Structure formats: structure tokens, C-alpha cells
Amino acid sequence: MRIAMIGGGYVGLVSAACFAEFGIDVAVVETDPKRLQALREGRIPIYEPGLDALVASNVTAGRLTFGDDIATAVKGATAVFIAVGTPPRNGDGRADMTYVHTAARQIAHALDDYAVVVTKSTVPVGTSRRIAEIIREAKPDVQFDVASNPEFLREGNAIGDFMRPDRVIIGLDSDRDQTRAQEILRTLYRPLYLIEAPIVFTSLESAELIKYASNSFLAMKISFINEMADLCEHVGANVHDLARGMGLDGRIGRKFLHPGPGYGGSCFPKDTLALSRIAQEAGAPSRLVEATVQVNEARKASMGSRIINACGGSVAGKTIAILGLTFKPETDDMRESPSLPIIHRLMESGATIRAFDPVGIEAAKRVLPDGIQYCDDALDAAQDADALVVLTEWNVFRALSPTALRARMRGDIVMDLRNIFEPGAMRAAGFTYASVGRP
Ligand SMILES: NC(=O)c1ccc[n+]([C@@H]2O[C@H](COP(=O)([O-])OP(=O)(O)OC[C@H]3O[C@@H](n4cnc5c(N)ncnc54)[C@H](O)[C@@H]3O)[C@@H](O)[C@H]2O)c1
């Protein structure tokens, strides 16, 4: 079996490599010349644990190829996956469908035999039907079906999530006979049937909405625990005890109850915003999702002030060490990372920034202002710093010795926005230590 994957980013590349590992021939189409060149030279243009080895072995086995010619990739493919970006549209927060619609038009021109066109990108309700229209307009005679197969992988654990998913959602057109499309998708995901992963067939509209609703629910959970962390600080409770006490209730669950500086990344911010717009346009506004967006924006924006207050009300002329730049550990993704507004605020307020991130520095340089001193490791960042701020909970930071940190720093302030350090140990090392939602 042969498939095409349009888009070789986080989702496209991981999905392509995993399908290839399942024994399927996968042709990846990538239009970004730098990304494509890297892939052709055997380099992985993004950081994702284990992806380099998976890509290399499947390239060697001849099952995974990279190119920019969609016609070559689509020829002979029984399924064509769309895995291009759907960033927020400037100004209104709706998903920008330019890349998806362009991909649909390109697929239409390339298609000369039956294929199922599968959307993996996160797209608003109605997109799969729009893709079908685009293809039908361009190629009225070609046989095809459309499917919605939203991707739930998490960056940092993407291969495991793809290979052992909680579920696979496949939306098909409930108005037409979908036997052929269903058979192709069942074959593609056969290895997951063998491990009894739930594979849920539903309508196009439901599949499209499941993805947005899932991400928005998780984002809402994070915003909820962040608000509870604030409350804990005011009433002297401990947010970790609160989260554990809540999470042991199976109806609530323990995951996504970790407080922090607000969620970031390429998915939650844009997907909550897009869902709130989708709901407004459909005439069924979601006040919970709208509030989640607002709570998170306000939280990220307030973190700079929190740090400045911890530094005695001013950071002018002070050196701040920043540990972690990416929106979460085990990725180099800087999209919507809380580090962006925080570092901007600190620099505008006159601070000098010494920053370290295990893999995100190159990506950070592209989006952060000039003038940041990028360091070789956490201790290097702490050198002569007046204050230290933890922004991403990389494991390597958890292992830091408080006394070694203290010895490097000029000042004694630590603002731990991920609660990775033990308050008692930090105070014993001589720090004025503040974290999130803990007494
Ligand atoms: N990143 C995640 O963790 C994640 C998880 C689940 C779902 N998603 C969704 O998956 C989609 C893709 O996200 P991503 O993070 O992989 O984006 P990305 O920006 O990393 O990758 C998209 C890639 O598509 C390429 N591209 C765009 N138009 C193209 C075209 N016409 N032909 C060939 N290549 C083209 C771009 O050059 C880019 O490399 C989005 O809708 C996102 O919301 C992302």
C-alpha cells in the first residue's frame, strides 16, 4: 500500500514515519525548501525524541521518501493525507485555512485515480466537505472520498502517541457509501487494531469537532488548576495536594492538573480560539471556552509582573537567568510559549537575560528579541544572576543542586513557575524561593 503525506512538519513527519514503520510506502511532500533539504540529507528539521532513528530506518528500507512534487507523491496513492498548518488567522483567531485549501487544490490537480483524501490537520467543522467541493470543482470526473482523521499526538511523545493512541478518530461522509474509504483506513491502521486501540468511526462533522473539543477541554483543565493555584496562594493551601485530592476521583483524572505560567504551544492557544469562533458563528457560543482563552492570555501576560514583584518591584539593571524557553519539555517548539511575553516584559523593564534551554535555543533565537545571552547550561545561565526563573520543566533542571545554583548566583531570588524544586531545599540553600500555588 502506498500513501502521500502533504506537509512534513511535526504531525506530517511523525505520521509518515509511523505509517512507514507499519509497512506502508509513504511519500512526503514538503514545500519549505529548508525542511525538505534537511529531510533529503537525513537530518530531522524538528526535535522529536526517537524520530531521527525511525525516519532513518524507514528511508533505508525504501518505504519513506521526501519531495516537493505532489503529482509524483499522489500517483498510485490510495490515501492522501493533509497535514499542513492551520495557524490562527491574523486579527480574528479563526483557523487560517489557506494551506489546507491550497493543498486540496494541488491534490485535485494531481489526482487521476481513486484515493481517499484524509485531513489530519486540525480544521473547523465543514472543512472536509469544503475539500471535497474543491476537488470536485477542479476534477469533476475523478473518484475520491474525503475523511477526517484528526491527530492527537503530543510533541515530545509523538511516536508513542501515534503507535499506542488512546483512540483513533475517523470521520466519513455519512451521506455516501463509504465502504471503500473505510476499508483503506482500516488497512492503514491495522497494527493499531492488533493492539486493541479504540478506532472510532463517525461523521465528518463529529470528527472535526472532537479534536477541537478535546484540546479545549484539556486547556480548560489547565486554566482551572491555574486559577486554583492563585486561590491556594491567597488561602494558604497547596495546589499539589488539591490536584491530587481532586484527581484521584476517576471522573476528574489526575492529568493536566499541573499549575504553571499558562499553556502555550502550537495547539491549545489556537484551537481554543478557533473553537470559540466556530461556536459563535454556529450560534451556540461557548462561554467556557471563551473564558479559558481569556484566563490563559491574562495569566501569561501577568507572569512578567509576578517576576518583577519578586525582584522587589524592578528588574532594571538586573540579570535574570531563564531556565527553559520552549512551551514544554522534549520539544523545540516555541510557538505561543509563555517564555515569549515573559522575556519581552523583562527586557522592556530593563533586565538582562541569560537563558538556557536544552534544545530550543536555535528556535528561540528566531522569535525572541536580540540581546539575550544564550548559555551553555543551567549553571552557566545562573552565573552572576540576580534572580532565576524556571519557565520549562526539563528533567535536567530538576536534577540541579540548589547549593550549586546558589554558589553561581549574585542574588538569591528563584521564581519557579513549574514547581520543579522542593521549597524546603531551596530555602535551606539560602534562596528567597517562590513557586506556584504552594505556601
Ligand atoms: N504540533 C502538534 O503537536 C499537533 C498535534 C496535533 C495536531 N496538530 C495539527 O496538525 C496540523 C499541522 O501541525 P504541525 O505542528 O505539524 O505544523 P508544521 O507547521 O510543523 O508543519 C506543517 C508543514 O506543512 C508544510 N506545508 C504547508 N503547505 C504545504 C503544501 N501545500 N504542500 C506541502 N507541504 C506544505 C509546511 O512547510 C510545514 O512544514 C495543524 O493543523 C495542527 O493544529 C498539531
Image: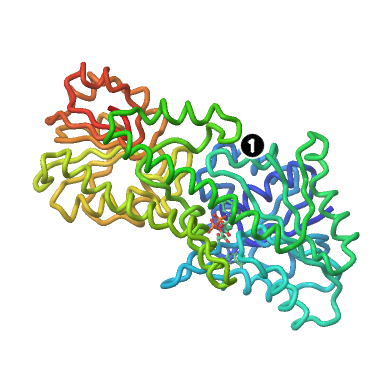
User: In the picture shown, does residue 279 fall above or below 333?
Assistant: below
Observer-nearest residue: 276 or 47? 276
Observer-nearest residue: 124 or 50? 124
| Residue at image coords 82%, 65% | 174
Left/right placement of residue 381 relative to residue 24 reads left
Observer-nearest residue: 105 or 314? 314
Q: Residue 334: x percent and y percent?
A: 41, 51
User: In the picture shown, does residue 191 fall above or below 336?
Assistant: above
Q: Residue 3: x percent and y percent?
A: 77, 57
| Residue at image coords 86%, 80% | 141
Q: Residue 246: x percent and y percent?
A: 49, 31
| Residue at image coords 13%, 51% | 350
| Residue type (three-letter) at the residue carrying disc 1 | Gly
Ligand 1 appears in which quadrant?
bottom right
Q: Determine if the C-beta at disc 1 is less than 8 A from ligand 1.
A: no
| Label 1 neighbour load within 10 Å: few <14, some 14-19, many 20+ | some
Left/right placement of residue 208 relative to residue 372 reads right
As drawn, which residue projects farthest toward the left? 317
The mark total stands at: 1
Q: Residue 67: x percent and y percent?
A: 65, 61
| Residue at image coords 23%, 45% | 373
Q: How is the image coloured?
A: rainbow
Question: Which SS class for mark 1?
Answer: helix
Q: In which quadrant is the C terminus drawn?
A: top left
Observer-nearest residue: 174 or 333? 174
- Residue hosting label 1: 160
User: In the picture shown, does residue 374 fall above or below 403?
Assistant: below
Q: Quarter-wise, where is residue 54 in the image? A: top right
